Every structure is written in structure tokens, then in C-alpha cells.
């Protein structure tokens, strides 16, 4: 299913090879001012050129709003935004049927869809599909007036010192290798009580959306995994007159926002496509083989993800508000 | 919404104070043998008496199957299972309106539902609602013939040595405090290719379900947060003739199962209800106050959760199969 | 799927042979007064003893509210209502596998579910499942305070003169035959603008729900089929200061309520189970055969349906409000 | 919500005034041959120029397939089809706020959305939105290989004699009036057992979809309203070796297809926009007024609907198969 959400609902379509990709957003309130320029900042934050070690490909990601907008304002009807895929390079996915790339969906997808040369392998799983998500995030943020989103990378390759990152990235690139990273997202200004008991807890919905981003390996709220080593008296957040006095819970109690900032961390794996040769199986020759992946890839794609994480949080929260 | 899943779909109902709680499961294939005795083992694993430091309350959790079963076999019609709430003790939730318990939903729920003395605070948020989930998990496991689920606690209070746990739990109980823990769940025998691109990745659905369990603070798959400090050449799982040669990804590539066991870890916070006095705000007197929570609580409720984590995984996978 | 609705959402469960049947209603607002006595009138209107020619079976349909109610008021949590199936008579559905009853689902169901002796044939398709629908309708009507529902039979066997019905019914019973009927439903007091453009027009949702009632053959709004023979100048409803001056549209324009009463008619077929011998095929002997259906059946089950039609309308409207 | 269906799922977007309109279809099986030419025939059947009395506007409705297609075959990913709205004429909907057009959504929409000059009145309710539905129908028919759809107008203005229609239409046009009509749709080649018990009966789903077409006033299956005047012995369809021997039920028993053709009739009202002056209320002057609607409208839009009715049936059946 290409759809997420109940009321503020996102449907994405397109693949890395299709002429266009896009998103339809249902449930946008009427009367919100919106113009293509509103998308520029967030789309730029996602672009490869915005980060060290990003792929040098130039993409012009200009949104075309084709429905749901009239005279510069949303109409309440479904809002559809398109992007062109100018940069389609016809890749030989056939070779990845023989030697599926470690860390990619090639192998699982080819079994799921019958070992056919299915373009979905390089299609729906593409990180390119996070572009319409970022566009939907821009609209969601507009809906969530007064609420602010701040996601940033706090660790690259296990290191929290930003000054060292450029050097680490250079070295990894030289070695033909890649790095992972951790993103922290903090949302402030939320009303108290968002979320639903049980299945639609805030954590359930945010984690559902965040794990849709390719390459996520873990998510934790507030004290997260560290809380499992704490005592109740340490981890509990006592209340003061303005709400919680600390934020071990990450802003959620019993699945509902509690007035503290919503705060969570997301672990991104290192980029799977590396130029270093990898020993892996060739399913055609039925022997171990050496795979060398060409092309220009991000050394640390985690650096491009904060705006995507923000978009996912905004999409979930716009649906709950 | 009290519902989870698309095809194998779970609807739970009831509250800690209602005469009964239960679950309706839609999408159960016809012809599966099922009898009340099938539920005993998993229900026993969830019971307080099964773990050290568990609450001494005795609960008789006998399932009554009221529809969807004929002559000992499922009929394909919705399967409804009921449990009695024999043990309803009328609690004074009023006091928690004045002094909301740290770590509980009291505060957020009372704001959400207007500071009324709403029994939902002690109702829908109750850990009691995991009982029908365990029952649904038993049915899901039956649907998933040949697939095995193995969840267990691997850490209590930060310690991975089981021999030390009884002592740690005794000490925490004496101090009126509580402990958290980490559960690891491994699912073997899964077909390759379960999951859907993007929104309904296996990780998205499992995390959605797992964060519905009260008290979860984090989830990670395979190498999890550690992967963010690894290089691509370390973290990638090369393939051999039988599939992945190691399992850094936790059995999922691109959101699809890849033939390796599905493997994830869940962090549970320490029990929020502790008998130690807690300094927190009294919203009636508008002063800081001291809250002492009476009653008998689990020292480390994480010990009762492995069967719930298994149930959640089984429910998700039965929906995907 | 056993579920209908988005926000006020109904899930029914049970079969004619199961120990209990029931309904879970999600999305009931909190604080509504509700007690078992509230259900008596509508349940009585559905009972066989309430109509001439009704089956003489005595059913005690006492609702048991097992969740979602506290201290005589709804809590906002899912509301589950159970009924016992005291009157289960183990029928030989095997014979209907050989000679499927004309007008029943026996044949289609046995092909769908593989010609097995599937109790669903006499299970989920049973008119008995309209009992939990009537119960849900009672709750929906409570939610729709100030809106009134009035459904009644306006034709039996093609005759609009009520005085003749008892005689017609007697004659049909003597002939071992059955009669159909038409029900008109009028809902007054609705706010203007209920319904959604396109897929979720009021007519779409009402017809969806109404065709779920076993035995419906047609539905029309306002002038209905007659409108196809009218001119625009005749059929159009001009407006006056209070809204439409006549009601050819049945209270709906462009899928939205327009302030006039919602008015529609439903055609019910004659009862399919007749005691008159019917020439039909025996799939075991592979020859035409004669089927004589025993048991006591309604001569004209349409007479019991007005309260069910009201319930369906109320369920749809409670979801839209 | 702009979405219909569960597995073969249609999301339409756009308004009469937006630059483009379109549809995203989720759940299209992979490997189906598809090219723009496949849409020509059905799109032509819907065009105004194809029918007597059709609006003389020329529309070039050329589908652009932007995703889900690779190398002339569907990929299994969401299929998005766009159409341009070349022919946008900026209408003065403001006047219809003062004098809402009888039979249109103007009044109900303006109350629903606050009497603002909301372009939705002339937007989402537009018959133009049936164009992407017809496109989705083409894809659904491809999915339903071996199943044939045949819808046609059987009555115009109450008359079943096609030879008289041109004359009737001419006269109505001269009088500035309009005509309604009845469409019959017959679907052959369906497998037995499609549909689900209760809520998702074939009739429920077909009627839901059909009532989404603007201007529908009624639907009936098989003997339809006439069945309410029949006896069980007349209406019941006895079985022969090949299935039902006649088709009073319209091909459905207990909500499931029974092997006979699915057969239903749809009543369309006369076109609401007529050039004859209409006496109706002016909500600005607060007096009765005379409304004369300019522009070129279909005399009998029912003539353009058979292909839309087929599309709706195909969409529902593709979801059930």
C-alpha cells in the first residue's frame, strides 16, 4: 500500500525510473497559503550537494502542484504535487539478479517477485521516493502552525564531534567505504494529549513512518535503550506546574504527548553501496564472486536524512492534530 | 482506533474496570484446529506468578471463544475471544487527577479528556489489555505454521547475567524501586519477501505493534544503533548460497524479509509505579507534593513481556503472509 | 471484513450457530447515558412476534454491555455488546450442499469455500446478524441527538393498502409461499452538508450499508427511478428561504445533505425459504430434484426490517456527523 | 476521502479548475501490457461528442502514465495517470452563492464550507472527475481478463424505444429542458463466490461506487423493485446443472456472485443545469428570484454514463478478484 495516515493522508507514487514521482495529500485543511517557493528550503536540505560526501549528481527538484490549490490557497481537495525524474539512467539491474547487492532489497525483491528482472528492485525502494515525502512534510508543517521541528545529525561513524566528520568522510571515501549516523529529532510546541491509547500511540505512529525511510536500523524515545538500565526513581519524570520537569520519556506518556518536547533518535546504517569489492554469492554461476559497485554514492546518506525525519514526524502529527 | 492490521486484523475491547475484555480477529483462515487449551502456555507466560518480583495478584485468565469456531475448527468468520475481569478493584483515580503519577498517562489523559475523572486513565491504558493481544498471538502463531518465535529477556537493569537478576530484583523491591529490561525476539522459518515497499516495511509494522505495548522506549533490528558506528563493509551482509552469511540487518532488506531470522531488540523502561515516595506536583493544591503509590506492582514488568512481543510479531507476520 | 465505518465504526461477530453474537462500536463519544433498557424497543421491533406472519420462534434478545460503559455512561472506549444464541438448532446443512436452496447463498458459498460443509452457509449470512446491527443503531441514534428516524413498510406484495396485508399474508402462508415488500425511511433534523464529495456521498454510504441487509434488491432516493422519466424542470428542487421547496432529490445534492429530510426506499425480495416444493438441481445425483424446505419462516420478512434500515441509516450518519 | 477499494485501490485527485486531474491505482498486478491507446475507446465513449444532445465542447483527453509502467508493462507499483484540464473557463461561482442552482451541490457545499466562495462547488463535484474513473476502469478491465462488461442506456425520458430518442432530445433542447435515463449493466464471465458476507456484499460495493457518479437516483439488481411485488416461488432462481436457470437475483445470492451474469440497472436524473428560467431563492436579496443558467450542457447526460458505470463495476470487481 502506498498510503499512510487516516485523516491527513499521504499517497506516494512513482519509481526511480518513471517519468514523474509525486504525492497526493488528502485531508489538507482549506485556506492554507501555499506556493512552490515554500518547498525550496526543505528540498535543498535533502539534496546531495548540501552535505559533505554527497553524490555529485545535480537534481533539479521543482514541485508542480497540480490539484487542490486555487489562487494560492489550498481548497481542501486532495493536493497533488509532482516532480520530474530528469535524471533517469537506465541501469543494468540484470547483473544484480545474478549478484544481489549486500544490504539492498535486490535479493528479497527478486524472490518476492519471482526472480524476474523487476524494475521495482531499483524502483520503489529508491531513496528518491523520500522527495515527495519531504514535500508532504512541508505541507504538514504548514498545517501544524506554531509547532517547530528540529532534526540534526548528532553522530557520524560513532563520533559526536562535528569537527572531525569531514575528515572521517574523506577517509571513508578514499577507502571506498561508507559511514552510518544518528539523527535526533525534537518537536516543540505540541498540544498535550495527542495520540490514541494502544495501537495508535505517538511512538507507534512515528516509528511506523520513520522505519519507512530506507536504511533505518533503530529508533528510541527519550532515555531510550538507556532507560532499560535505569531505576524507576531515576527514569520517571516528576511533574512541576508547567508539566514534566525532565524528559526521560521523550515527551510521551501512555502513548500520548505530555507537554514536554517530543524527542527521539534514529539510527541510520552506513550506505550499502560501496565501491570496495565485496565477496558475495553469484546466483547464476552458483559460486562466491566479487562485486564492485560503480557509480557515485553518498558516503554517509544519514547526513541528508534530518529533513526526511522531520517530514515523517510532521506527517504523523498532522494526522493526529 | 482499536484495530490493527489489514487482512489478519485485530480489534481489542475492554478496560481494566469493564466486566470483560476481549479481541475479535478478522481474517483467520478456515479449518484451523483451535481449543481453549491452546492458549494456556502463552497466557501463563504473561502471568505475574511466572516471574520473580511479579505482583502476587492471582488472575484466572480463561479464554471463552464465542464466535468463529465450529466443531473445534475455525470457520473463517471473525473469531471473538473473551476474558472476565474478576479482579476489578475500584481504585480512587481521583487522587491521580490531583497528583498525576510520574511515568503514567494520568496527566496527558486528563488534559486530553478535559480533567474529568475519566476511567480511561486506569482503563484503556492498562497493561491488562495485553491479555487479548497474547490470545490473538496464539491464533496468529497457529496461522504461521512452521514459523517459530523465541523472545526472551536478555538484560535486567543493565545486567546480562541472569544469575544476578533475582538478587537485583530483591534489592529493588526492598528499596521500593523498579528495574527495566531488554527483550530480544528471533523469528525463524519466515518466507523470503514478506513486507511491502515503503510504508509497510516489516520494520515499520513490527515497530508500530511493539510500541503499542505499554512501557517500550526503543526498538532496533539486527546491529541496530551499533550499525550507525559501523562501516558499510562491516555492516553489509554478504550472501552465500543459502542467503545472508551474517545478520547485521536483522533479517530485513529494503523492508522485506531476506531469509535470515527476523531479529530485533526492545527496550522496556523500569515499572513506573514505585512505592518509594516521589516529589511531584499537586495540581489541586498547586504545590510540589510527595506521592507514595500503594498496591502491589511488578518490580520489573519487562520479565512478563517476551510473550507479548512474540504475539505482536506474530500478529504482524500473519497479516503479511 | 466484518467492519463498517471510519470514525463511528461497527464490527460485528458471531454466526447463527456460535454461542454468542455481538458488536464492537469504536468511536462512541464519551459521556452518553446508556443502559440495557434503551435497546428494548428497537429489538422488539425486529422480533418475529411483532409482525403478522412472523416465525413463531421465541427469542430472548437481551444485550450484555461488556466494555466501554462505566457508571451508566459511555467512556469513549470501544463499546462491546453481546447477545446469547440460546436457540441454536443443529441443522443439516449437508443436504443443502446437495440441493442448494434457491435464493440462498448455499451454492455460491459452497463454491467459494470449496464445497466443504462449511457452517458459514448457515452462519455469517444469517439474518440473525442484523440483531447486533440494531443494537449498534440504538447507540448511533443516541449519538445523533435531535435527529429522528422513521422507517415503515409501505408496500407488501405490491399492495400499498395495509388493511389488505393480513389477508395476503394468510393466503401466502397457506400456499406455502412468501411475499416481498418496500420500506420507506425518512430521517429528519439532519444538519446541512453531511457527506463527502465523490466516493463517500451520503447515497453511497447509505446504499452500501443497506445492501448489507440480507434480501435487499434495490434502493432509490427521492423520486428515484421515476426521476429518469422526468424533465429537469420537474425534478429539480427549487430553493426557498428555508431550503428546498420540494424533495425530489431525497435530501441530497452532490452527495451532501441539503436540509430536506433524507428520504429513500428499499425493495425487499420475498422470503427465499418457502415450504412449497421447488424444482431445482441436485448436485450429488446430478439430476433435477424437488426441494421442500421445512421449518418455520417469515412469510414476509420485509415487515421486520424497518428498524434494521433505520439502524443502517443511523450508523452511516453517526459516522458522518 | 478520495480513495475507494482495499487491494485494487483508486485515488482520484484534481478539480474542474485545477491544471491537471488524475488517478493513482494501487494494487495493479505486475506484467500487464498497457499503453495510452488502450484508453482511447472508453474515453471516447464518455465524450460529449459521442452522444446526441451532448455539449459541443471539444476536450482532448489524452492520458499521461507517469508511474507504475516500465517497458509497456505494469510494474506492480502504484500506477498514476494524468489528464490536462485545458478547457478551464473561470466561472463566476459567486452568483451561485447568491442563487444556488437547483439540483446542484452549490447550496449544501456553501453551508458545509461556510458560505465562502469555495471553488470546490464547481470543483470536486464536477462530472469531469469521472474521466480518471474511466481510466481506472480501463486498467480494471485489463486485470479482469475474460470478464466482459456491457452497459447501455435502455430508457431516455421514460421511453425504451431508441428510435424516438433523437426527437425527444431535440424537443427538450428547444424547450431549454433536460431528460433522465436508465442504464443497464451486465457483467459476464465472473467466477462464482466473489463478494464477502455482510458489509462487503457485491451489491454493497457496486452500489457504493455507482452512487459516487454524479446524478444517480437509484440502483436495483435483477428483478429489483419489481421483486417486492413477487412471490418467493416466482422470484427464486432454481438451479440447473450450470447454475441458476433464470436471473431474478441479478447474479448475486447472499452477497456473493452465483455464476449468473451480474445484472443491475441505474436511474439517472435529468441534467440539473437547464436553460429554462427557474424560480428559486436568492439568499442575498432574500427574495424569490429567477435563475437562468447559461452555457452548453448535455440534454441527457445519462447517455454518456454507460462507460462510467462499467468502470465502477470493473473497479469493484478487480478489488474482489
Image: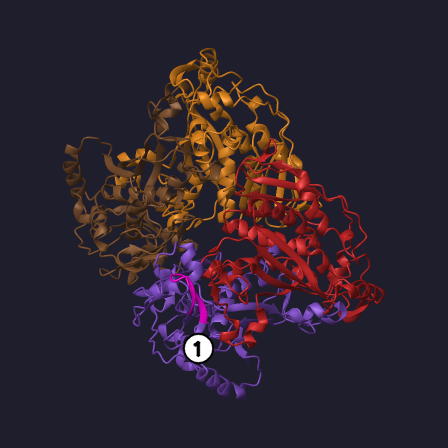
Chain colours: A red, B purple, C brown, D orange
Q: Is B209 covered by the magenta stretch?
A: no
Left or right of C258? Residue A20 is right
B286 or B159, which lies in front? B286
Residue A297 coordinates in the image, percent (x, y):
78, 58
Q: Can residue B10 be seen here? A: no
B214 or A5, which lies in front? B214
Instruction: Residue A302: name its quadrant.
Output: bottom right
Compared to residue D173, the image places residue A17 above or below, namely below
| Label 1 chain ID | B
B251 or B86, which lies in front? B86
Helix, strand or loop at mark 1: loop
Instruction: Residue D156: name its quadrant.
Output: top left
Tell which residue pokes out farthest to the top in this image: D174
Q: Is B288 covered by the magenta stretch?
A: yes
Compared to residue A151, the image places residue A224 above or below, namely below
Left or right of B310? Residue B237 is right
Magenta range is B279-289
Compared to residue A204, the image places residue A22 above or below, namely above
Q: Can residue C128 be seen here? A: yes
Q: Which residue is mark 1?
A: B276
Left or right of B123? Residue C85 is left
Tell which residue pokes out farthest to the right in this image: A174
C255 or A52, which lies in front? A52
**Magenta portion: prevailing SS class:** strand
Q: What crowding class fits label 1: few (fewer than 14 Cα within 10 Å), some (14-19), or many (20 or more)?
A: some
Residue D254 coordinates in the image, percent (x, y):
36, 48
Residue C78 coordinates in the image, percent (x, y):
37, 57
Residue A168 coordinates in the image, percent (x, y):
80, 66
Amino acid at each position: 500500500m502506498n498510503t499512510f495516515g487516516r485523516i491527513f493522508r499521504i499517497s506516494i507514487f512513482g519509481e526511480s525510473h518513471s517519468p514523474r514521482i509525486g504525492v497526493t495529500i488528502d485531508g489538507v485543511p482549506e485556506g492554507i497559503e501555499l506556493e512552490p517557493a515554500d518547498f525550496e528550503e526543505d528540498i535543498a536540505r535533502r539534496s546531495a550537494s548540501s552535505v559533505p560526501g554527497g553524490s555529485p549528481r545535480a537534481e533539479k527538484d521543482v514541485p508542480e502542484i497540480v490539484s487542490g490549490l486555487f489562487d494560492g490557497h489550498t481548497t481542501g481537495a486532495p493536493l497533488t504535487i509532482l516532480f520530474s525524474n530528469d535524471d533517469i539512467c537506465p541501469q543494468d539491474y540484470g547483473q544484480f539478479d545474478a549478484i544481489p547487492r549486500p544490504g539492498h532489497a535486490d535479493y528479497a525483491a527478486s524472490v518476492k517477485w519471482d526472480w524476474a528482472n523487476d524494475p521495482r528492485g531499483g524502483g520503489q525502494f529508491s531513496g528518491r521516493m523520500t522527495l515527495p515525502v519531504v514535500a508532504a512534510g512541508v505541507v504538514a508543517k504548514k498545517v501544524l502552525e506554531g509547532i517547530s521541528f528540529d532534526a540534526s545529525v548528532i553522530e557520524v561513524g560513532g563520533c559526536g564531534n562535528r569537527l572531525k566528520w569531514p575528515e572521517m568522510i574523506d577517509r571513508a571515501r578514499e577507502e571506498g567505504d561508507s559511514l552510518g549516523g544518528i539523527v535526533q529529532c525534537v518537536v516543540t510546541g505540541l498540544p498535550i494529549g495527542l495520540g490514541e491509547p494502544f495501537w495508535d500511540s505517538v511512538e507507534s505512529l512515528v516509528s511506523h513512518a520513520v522505519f519507512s525511510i530506507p536504511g533505518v536500523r533503530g529508533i528510541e524515545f527519550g532515555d531510550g535503550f538507556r532507560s532499560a538500565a535505569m531505576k524507576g526513581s531515576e527514569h520517571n519524570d516528576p511533574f512541576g506546574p508547567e508539566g514534566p520537569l525532565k524528559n526521560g520519556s521523550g515527551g510521551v506518556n501512555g502513548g500520548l504527548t505530555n507537554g514536554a518536547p517530543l524527542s527521539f533518535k534514529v539510527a541510520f546504517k552506513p550506505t550499502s553501496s560501496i565501491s570496495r569489492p565485496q565477496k558475495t554469492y553469484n546466483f547464476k554461476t552458483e559460486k562466491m564472486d566479487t562485486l564492485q559497485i560503480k557509480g557515485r554514492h553518498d558516503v554517509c546518506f544519514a547526513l541528508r536524512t534530518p529533513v526526511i525525519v522531520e517530514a515523517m514526524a510532521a506527517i504523523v502529527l498532522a494526522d493526529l492534530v
